[in-house]
Image: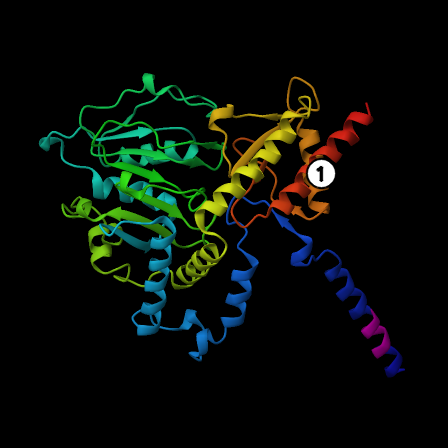
Amino acid sequence: SSSGGRSICICIWILCLRSNMAGRRNREDVLNFGAGPAKIPEEVLVTAQQELLNWQGYGTSLMEISHRSKEFESMLQRAKASLKTLLNIPDNYQILFLQGGGTGMFATVPLNLLRPESDGFTGADYIVTGTWSSKAAEEARKYGRATIVNPVSPSFTDLAPASEWKFSDKPSYVYYCDNETVHGVEFPEIPPVPAGSVLVADMSSNFLTRPVDVSKYGLIFAGAQKNVSCSGVTIVIVRKDLLAAGPMPICPTIMDLRLLAENDSLYNTPPTWGIYIAGLVFDHLLRSGGIAAYEKASAEKARLVYDAIAASNNFYRSIVTPHMRSRMNVPFRITGGQDKPSEALEDEFVKESEKRGMLQLRGHRSVKGIRASLYNAVTLDEVKTLVNFLKEFQEKHTASK
């Protein structure tokens, strides 16, 4: 009968629906240790969700209003003010919200800061400690001389002593990456550079995780998708006097920092939603104790993971020299107590961790192994859960021998 056919169709539909939902998780079931785009504070996401259709009573989504409107301008200025408070940014610095990511900045920096060799400058100096600083130096060579000042570790697991670095006579700037996301290498402090140097830092993956003396830098940039916002917005903090000379003649308009600063990030349509999320994150950090509180939390989270690795009797092996180990990105290999890493154990580790809701723990494809990223939004309790899993996984595979 027709009614019987309808009943069968409904039953099949229900079974299909249950099958499709079987693999779905709720947010509270997931621990996100991704390297980026990374976890965003839930409080921020809830606010964005509540305001998605009707932003602050304006009647539309923020994504739908003009970046020239007084409402957007007000939001932009608040975001800048909050960031200035968080980092105590001096008045002689400009805050910009741009597009292009860190990779875009690899070209933007030399296009704007390289000074003519006819004026006595000797190109730019680069301290290379991993994938991203290496790519930055490579990009800079398209526009001028870029000298790598330090002996480079082939595996990017250590940094030669500063006594072995060789700076050029008069570099336009000295560039370094404060935290290498891929290799898990982080500078414990500002690297020693010649007096008077214009220091440029890529802080994409440890931005807002510890206090920074902005006055010691000529330019700081950070892709926001680690600790600050969703992907699509790049934060630049630049000393205003460095913009006076203007960029190279070949510099694309969209990378002209002087022009972008003159227009307060509004020369063209900026990444409006990313700026909005960043502003919410800034306010969240201020309410949660500021940078000092997150510096303390970062140190404790990293300590728990590194201590678990050290106590594993070589079951897990850290691949970075202790004094350069990152608080943000912890790469390690699983050896099972053997001489070489076991990709079979690492595959099993990733599969088992995913079953438990711990996501994005597989290492970067160029390094392999495991990588846990411990950004600001990752909580101490979530890290403790990861550490307990490390111990359980080791016990399981040690007992089976």
- Residue at 34 percent across and 59 percent down: it is 81
270 drawn magenta:
no
Is residue 116 shown above or below 47? above
| Residue pictured at 86% horizontal, 77% vertical | 7
Percent of width and height locating residue 154:
45, 21
Q: Is residue 60 visible?
A: no
Q: Is residue 52 left or right of residue 243?
A: right
Does residue 60 lie above or below 379 as drawn? Answer: below
User: Between 118 and 292, which is closer to the camera in this rendering?
Assistant: 292
Q: Read off the residue under disc 1.
A: 389
Of 388 and 134, nearer the camera is 388
Please name the amino acid that badge 1 sits on. Answer: Phe
Residue 65: give x, y in percent of width and height.
38, 73
- Which residue is found at the position 80% from the left and 69% from the top? 14
- Asked whether the viewer can see residue 320, the reply is yes
Q: Judging from the image, what secondary structure is the residue with disc 1 in?
A: helix
Residue 7 part of the magenta-drawn span: yes
Residue sitting nearer the eye, 367 or 61: 61
Specify the quadrant that holds the N terminus. bottom right
Specify the quadrant of the image occupied by residue 148. top left
Question: What is the count of numbered marks?
Answer: 1
- Point out the image quarter for the C terminus: top right
Measured along the vertical axis of the image, is residue 248 above or below residue 118? below
Dominant secondary-structure state across the stretch colored magenta? helix
How many residues crowd mark 1 within 10 Å: few (<14), some (14–19), many (20+)? some
Which segment did they paint magenta?
Answer: 6-11
User: What's the residue at 17%, 44% (across, down)?
Assistant: 248
Quadrant in the rendering for residue 102: top left
